[in-house]
Amino acid sequence: MAKPDYAFKTASHSWYPTGRDGVYRARPGGAEIALSLERQEVPHALLEPGLKRAVTAWVIARGGRTLHLNGRKESVSPRQLDRPPTAPVRRLVSIAPSNAEIVGALGAVGLLVGVESSSDFPPEIRRLPRLGPDLHVDMEALSTLRPDLVLASLTVPGMERNLAGLDVLGVPVLVLAPGSIAEIEADVLRVGEAIGHADQARHAVDRMEADLRSLREAREARAPVRVFLQWWHNPMFSPARACWTNELIEHAGGVNVFRDLPGQSAQVGPEAVVAADPEVIFISWCGVPFGRLNAARVLRRKDLGAVTAIREGRVYALDEALLGRPGPRVVQGVARMAEYIRGVSDGRTRRRPDAEHA
């Protein structure tokens, strides 16, 4: 399936990138809109409900929770974009791998009739019809499945294209875009309620909280370790202020060195990484299978040679499925990070007597 050249479509227009950051042009008509996290400018004559929803989705997909549309400011949340089902859900579609994993954790895979192409867990999901990549789902194929509910996501920029397409179809939809562990847990409960698996959802959340509590207790009294979680390698990207992974790193005993950058993810240059001087680098490249992650590629970077993590050989591969999919398995991602971070803390403890003696 070829990637569409449009950014998103509403009932009246298709919107195309102009090549200028955040600026899109309408067909037909040629009108332009300008979008950023700080401000969104849309000609009033075009500002119908479908376009406002698309703009809201654009902001949320980049970690924003405030709409500043044509000078008017308002708080927004993914739930505002929901169109809940009005009847029991018998035919369910998931268009993000994290959503499919939530359904699996609730024991409700039998309700699924289609998923986006990268969904692979739990294993029985792999037999389901594929609807294309999570950034450009085939809406025509989705429509033929006659879903009672679609579980959509706005965790990655570009996913607003899917939400606009679902709006045109008019199908029931829940929109998941968590920015914290509490919001991941709330989404699990929300999905459980919508599909008639509320008790299973409560059990899944209770299990997550118990596991996280144990991890928190294990890291108490240890000073936080500076962590660079690398979402991509060239150019380098890190989770930023609005990403749930900040809390995952904290539960593991670390602190994201780029946690104060705006948005959900941020591009960082080698100079910034050197200045932040992480003690551990985790590579978890988006869409790259675990077996193809290459820590040596990072260790060999001469422009990062001054970084403590590079000098001491602390670059570790972590499966993106355990960190980049906001669902119950993020707890496993925390546990994996904690194993490596604990080694740094233990190393500090071993070095301290020598330092004091000197």
Image (cartoon, rainbow, N blue to C red):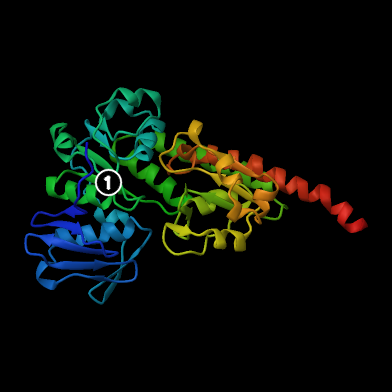
Left or right: residue 170 versus residue 266 is: left
Of all residues, the one furthest to the right in this rendering is: 357
Report the front residue among 83 and 332: 332
Residue 316 shows up from this direction = yes
Picture residue at 28% right of the left edge, 58% below the top: 58
Dot 1 corresponds to which residue?
Answer: 174
Of all residues, the one furthest to the bottom in this rendering is: 71
Report the front residue among 169 and 88: 169
Left or right: residue 21 versus residue 256 is: left
Asked if 200 appears above or below 183 in the picture, the reply is above
Left or right: residue 65 versus residue 14 is: right
Q: Position of residue 206 (x, y in %)?
A: 50, 40
Q: Position of residue 85 (x, y in %)?
A: 21, 42
How many numbered marks, from 0 up? 1
Picture residue at 20% right of the left edge, 46% below the top: 4
Asked if 247 appears above or below 86 in the picture, the reply is below
Q: Quadrant of residue 80?
A: bottom left
The kind of residue on which mark 1 rests is Leu
Picture residue at 13% right of the left edge, 32% below the top: 144
Asked if 3 appears above or below 90 in the picture, the reply is below
Picture residue at 29% right of the left edge, 51% below the top: 158
Secondary structure of residue under mark 1: strand
Quadrant in which the N terminus appears: top left
Q: Quadrant of residue 87?
A: top left
Q: Quadrant of residue 193?
A: top left
Residue 317 shows up from this direction = no
Q: Pointer 1: residues within 10 angstroms few (<14), some, or many (20+)?
A: many
Q: Position of residue 279 (x, y in %)?
A: 66, 52
Q: Position of residue 107 (x, y in %)?
A: 38, 28
Quadrant in which the C terminus appears: bottom right
